[in-house]
Amino acid sequence: MTAPVLRVTATEAALALIARLSAEHGLVLFHQSGGCCDGSAPMCFPRNEFMVGDHDRLLGRIGGAPFYISGPQFEYWQHTQLIIDVVPGRGGMFSLEGREGVRFLTRSRLFSDDESAALAQQQPDGPPRGAAEPSA
């Protein structure tokens, strides 16, 4: 049996930062909005302080944290695997890592034809919409 194809992954540096932020703030989640204020940076929020929209898609989990993307962004990025990394610099003004002197960054790569076919079998309708899991 082959491993499932992941729509979102994280580097070791990102996983370490997620662990630190979770230890300090409790359960967290990510949202990739593509909005205006912080561009398309992945944003990290306390789980109880962010309301997942009906059109948001749950791509997966990184470091135990659910990772959502807005519906329109998913349409654009659905053929790519998102790889969440950490780089020096100022984070988004609303994202938890903002005070750490680093920021989360989304890198991406196109899925291979085999991976795309596997995803179509894993999730025929794409990733779940809305708050697909409990908020706690």
Image (spheres, rainbow, N blue to C red):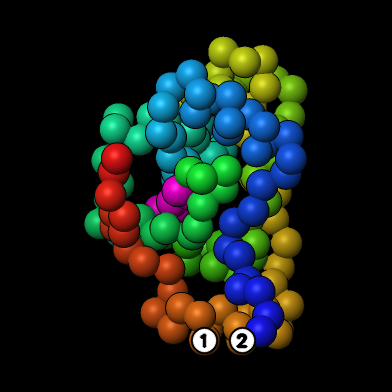
Q: Relative to residue 97, is residue 99 depicted above or below?
A: above
Three-letter residue code for mark 2: Ala
Residue 118, position in %: x, y?
60, 83
Q: Which residue is mark 1?
A: 121
Residue 107, position in %: x, y?
70, 49
Q: Is residue 124 left or right of residue 119?
A: left
Q: Residues within 10 Å of mark 1 (few under 14, many from 20)?
A: few
Looking at the rendered structure, which numbered label has been put on residue 131? none
Where residue 36 sits, quadrant-wise, is top left
Prevailing secondary structure of the magenta residues? strand
Q: Which residue is mark 2?
A: 117
Q: Secondary structure at mark 1?
A: helix
**CB under 8 Å between callouts 1 and 2?**
yes
Q: CA distance from mark 1 to mark 2?
A: 7 Å
Q: Residues within 10 Å of mark 2 (few under 14, many from 20)?
A: few
**Which part of the image, by quadrant, shows the C terminus?**
top left
Q: Is residue 55 left or right of residue 61?
A: left
Foreground residue among 64 and 77: 64
**Which part of the image, by quadrant, shows the N terminus?**
bottom right
Where residue 103 sits, quadrant-wise, is top right
Identify the residue at image location x=62%, y=15%.
100
Q: Tell me the magenta residue range.
A: 66-70
Question: Is residue 121 on the magenta stretch?
Answer: no
